[in-house]
Amino acid sequence: MTYLESDKRSRLVDQPLEMKVLISATLVFALVALGMALLYIYVSHHAPGGGILITPKDIAATYYGPGVGLDTLIGLAHIHLWGLLVAFWIIGFIFLHSSVSRRWKIFWSLLPYIAFLGDVAGWFLTTINPRFVWLVLLGGATFSTALFVMIIFSLWDVWLG
């Protein structure tokens, strides 16, 4: 029996109203932050005069050739790793109190960490070869999806669990 299973009060649905409101506000704020991150990627990587969608070539142009210097890339990685550590932990901690099975809790709460490490590795590898942009895209899409799933399921569980 785990600490979450041993105390029914730790489940999201069983929280008092003030805790449900705080959890919900945190998760909605995280959704807005995730949306802003995606919007930032769009406006910062979209090629002027290009189509509506960002292409892998647009992303690769940021890292390969005359794009970002190694010192800037290391700085960005440092800031992103520390900032996302906090976001992943808060969202994951809330999600661990949901009603999903233990296996799904482990899978979804660990996935953003692994995916983001792949994303960051892709940044550095793309400076060497633009084909590694697929690692950036896969890592970013995976950790974003994992966060979205944990946020939505946790919100559902808070109010309807």
Image: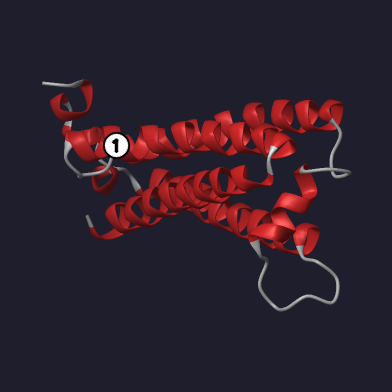
Residue 58, given in percent of the width and then of the height, sits at 73, 60
Residue 12, given in percent of the width and then of the height, sits at 29, 44
Determine whether 128 is above or below 12 in the image: above
Report the residue that reaches farthest toward the left: 1
Amino acid type shown at disc 1: Phe
Q: How many marks?
A: 1
Residue 100, given in percent of the width and then of the height, sits at 20, 44
> What's the coloring here?
secondary structure
Q: Quadrant of the C terminus?
A: bottom left
Q: Is residue 128 left or right of residue 114?
A: right
| Residue 126 occupies quadrant | top right
| Residue 91 occupies quadrant | top left
Q: Which residue is mark 1?
A: 107
As rendered, which of 154 and 71 lies closer to the eye?
Answer: 71
| Residue 10 occupies quadrant | top left
As rendered, which of 85 and 138 lies closer to the eye?
Answer: 138
Instruction: Please report the residue visible at 68 percent of the width from the left and 46 percent of the height from the top.
Output: 130
Q: Quadrant of the N terminus?
A: top left
Instruction: Please report the residue visible at 19 percent of the width from the left and 35 percent of the height from the top.
Output: 103
Q: Is residue 34 left or right of residue 159?
A: right
Instruction: Please report the residue visible at 89 percent of the width from the left and 44 percent of the height from the top.
Output: 66
Instruction: Please report the residue visible at 18 percent of the width from the left and 28 percent of the height from the top.
Output: 7
As rendered, which of 107 and 158 lies closer to the eye?
Answer: 107
Q: Is residue 90 left or right of residue 35?
A: left
Q: Residues within 10 Å of mark 1 (few under 14, many from 20)?
A: few
Determine whether 131 is above or below 39 in the image: above
Kindly state the secondary structure of the residue where label 1 is placed.
Answer: helix
Residue 148, given in percent of the width and then of the height, sits at 44, 54
